[in-house]
Amino acid sequence: MTSKAEESLEKIELETPLLVDAILVEECPRSGGQGGATPRSRANKNEEGNEKVAPETKGHNIPHGKWRDGLFDCFSDCGTCIGAWWFAPAALGQVMTRMNLGLDGRVSQRQERGYACKNIVRAWIVVLILSGFVSFNFLSTVFAIYLIVLLYRVSKHVQKRYNIAESTDRTILQVICCQCCVTARLLRHTTDHKKYNYRLCAEDGLPRDAPGYPLAEEDPALDVVGEPEIQAV
């Protein structure tokens, strides 16, 4: 009996490290390549012992199929409200930077970060300076019409990208009558504004630690962190 007990104990001692190693391999995701294992939702720890946010929890949590909130919910985020009301061209440029759109409101192949936002702000400053010298505020009128058309195109792009059903007539009416509210809603919809505070002076209106968006050539159905949605087969 004693010899059998000793043999069983030695067997357990030999198998335990192998079992622990197997568990650790299962728990730790493999890195690199498309064949890597999907990370678990539980947060891991780095060498310093600080928790790292799991990849599944990253992103802007952009709703699909509906707007994040209503057109007149501007005061749900005071930062975007101020940006859209007092610096509307810059705020629209920030949305365009997030969506990788060009100055015509269409998908741009330029990879320069903040290209649209920078140039819209520059044009806005030039118009403000020259409008005092041109009779009948011609430049201001032309620039205002340009912003209306641009806002319409950006709105339709966001609606298509996130499968938001809204009629063209309704979009046109909102863009003409409520430009600031439409811009503020676009800012709120394209990021989790409760998680990432609005930055007026940033090219995309987001803090530096905010995740990026898919490139223009990627499938619009991809999530904002660049991972495709899982669909049932």
Image (spheres, rainbow, N blue to C red):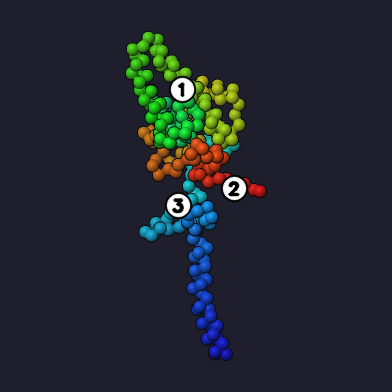
Whole-number angstrom distance, CA of label 1 to CA of label 2? 37 Å
Number of marks in the image? 3
Q: Is residue 159 above or below residue 61?
A: above
Mark 1: amino acid = Leu
- Mark 1 and mark 3 lie on one chain; the one further toward the N terminus is 3
| Image quadrant assignment for residue 131 | top left
Name the residue carrying label 2.
230
Question: Decide: marks 1, 3 in contact (CB < 8 A)?
Answer: no
Give the percent coordinates (x, y) of residue 7.
54, 85
Amino acid type at circle 2 is Ile
Q: Position of residue 92 (x, y in %)?
A: 45, 29
**Residue at image coords 55%, 35%:** 161
Sequence-wise first label, 1 or 2: 1
Quickly name the residue at label 3. 53
Circle 2 SS class: loop
Q: Describe the element under mark 3 as helix, strand or loop.
A: loop
Q: Residue at x 39, y 56 (%)?
A: 50
How many C-alpha atoms fall within 10 Å of the one at disc 3: few (<14), some, or many (≥20)?
few
Measured in 3D between alpha carbons, the distance from the residue under mark 3 to the one under mark 2, in whole angstroms, is 21 Å
Inspect the image, locate mark 3, and give the three-letter code of the amino acid beneath it.
Val
Residue 1 location, x and y as percent? Answer: 57, 90
x then y, percent, for residue 94: 43, 32
- The 10 Å Cα crowd at callout 2, few under 14, some 14 to 19, many 20 or more, is few
Residue in front for this viewpoint, 116 or 57? 116
Q: Which residue is mark 1?
A: 147
Nearer-the-camera pick, 115 or 160: 115
Check the image and report above or below for 13 versus 104. below
Could you tell whether 111 is left or right of 5 in the image?
left
Q: Residue at x 55, y 29 (%)?
A: 156
